[in-house]
Amino acid sequence: MYEYVIRVTNSSKEPYCVTEILARLKRTPRNQSYLVKCSPPGALSDDLLKELFMQWPKHIIGLHLNSWLSPNPRNTDIDRLEMFCKWLPSNLRLLDASYTLKELPSPEVQQRFVKALPKSLEYLSIKGNGLGRHMRAAHIKNLVKTLHVSHALDLRENNFHHAEEIAGLQALSGLPAKITVLGIDTHPMLMNSIPSQVRRLGLPTFCLSPTCKPKPIIPATVSYLEFSGYLFKEMTLEHLPSYITSLSLERCNLGILTNQDIIKLVASIPKTVTWVSLRANRLFTKRTVSERDRLLESLAPFNTDGRLQLDDNGEEEWIRAALPLINGIEQQRVPNWDCAYQIATYLGAHSLTLFKKLAQRKRMFTSIAETIPLINGSQ
């Protein structure tokens, strides 16, 4: 889920008034899904927050909860959290409530926290809240029954490996029936009870490590697999089941690997996976121009039909990430004008600068490349 950061203080670190913050919020993109994040975190008083949420813009449906809470010991006060949740805008559909419970919570606090969350959510992340501590598997089953979410739920990093397991208990059987996107840790108690309606599954990268045993068994109903955490050179993806057709390795810090290790990892992905996202891995940072070019050249054999998503990867990626789209032209997957228009729309760049560089790299006719219109005009 993308984040949109809103600055709520001036250069003297004094909070803006509610009117100014609302003006900034109203300038955020419309008809897009993102989580609004407060910067700096917890900079607003409770009174300011209450007033702000009462006037919250209708087009903003996503919120990063923890960034709006003031960073003080009272965050662990469940009474205060319940009060704060009552103030949340009624139009919220996307909520990131990760790492909100600062200390290891009791089962009672966990239940109160979950019950306090909005009731009309489509996406909810409650990562890193220690929900598996001090709990039996039966408590976890009752906890997930309390959730009000209709599409996507992230339960990762919740210490579920500490929970006392009961043989045969389906810990996730109480999940809302409409949830098709699920993020969990690889505890057998969870992996063995994934509901059949789940199509997209998020797992920690640790399960790819040689030291992770037993390996999780991914249900055959899942076609989209997403990993979170660092990917290291000893990890491999060659054992992915054939029914996985989409794979997300976004923000897995692949940029720290050598070119050789990156290629080795990508080469291990089975050909049955037809779409791979490598976004936001800083693949092109801290590399020389020749190193970046060699990396792109080495990735090309694995990028047939635009299989690899390489944008948002660091220095000059706005030029380099355009090349896979141009490859789409060569493979007759995307019409010339549509492809160039998509690139220009996404980048919002100077037309002459962008297309001259692309023309030079791909030996396109510069006179043609310079005539592609930009939706946002030149900047």
Image (tube, rainbow, N blue to C red):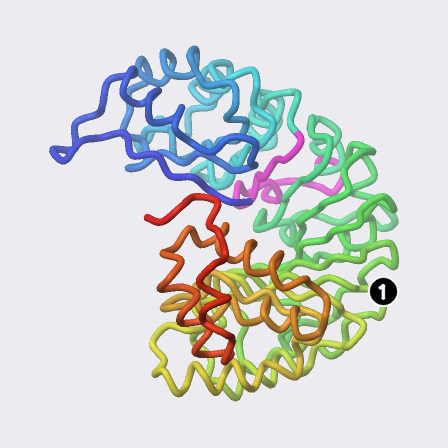
Q: Is residue 155 above or below residue 46?
A: below
Q: Look at the picture and state if 207 lies above or below 90.
A: below
The residue wearing badge 1 is 243
Q: Residue at x 29, y 15 (%)?
A: 19
Camera-side residue: 200 or 76? 200
Asked if the magenta segment contains residue 135, the reply would be yes
The percent coordinates of residue 363 (x first, y second) are: 50, 80
Three-letter amino acid code at disc 1?
Tyr
Residue 264, given in percent of the width and then of the height, sits at: 60, 85
**Rendered residue at 72%/53% (across/down):** 201
Towards the viewer: 89 or 154: 89
Give the main secondary structure of the magenta stretch: loop
Left or right of 70? Residue 102 is: right
Residue 27 vertical placement versus 241 (above, below): above
Which quadrant holds residue 144?
top right
Residue at the far left: name it: 12
- The span picked out in magenta is 122-139
Judged from the image, the secondary structure of the residue bearing numbered disc 1 is: loop
Task: Give the residue at x 16% y 27%.
Answer: 14
* Occupied quadrant, residue 150: top right
Instruction: Find out whether residue 246 is within the magenta segment.
Output: no
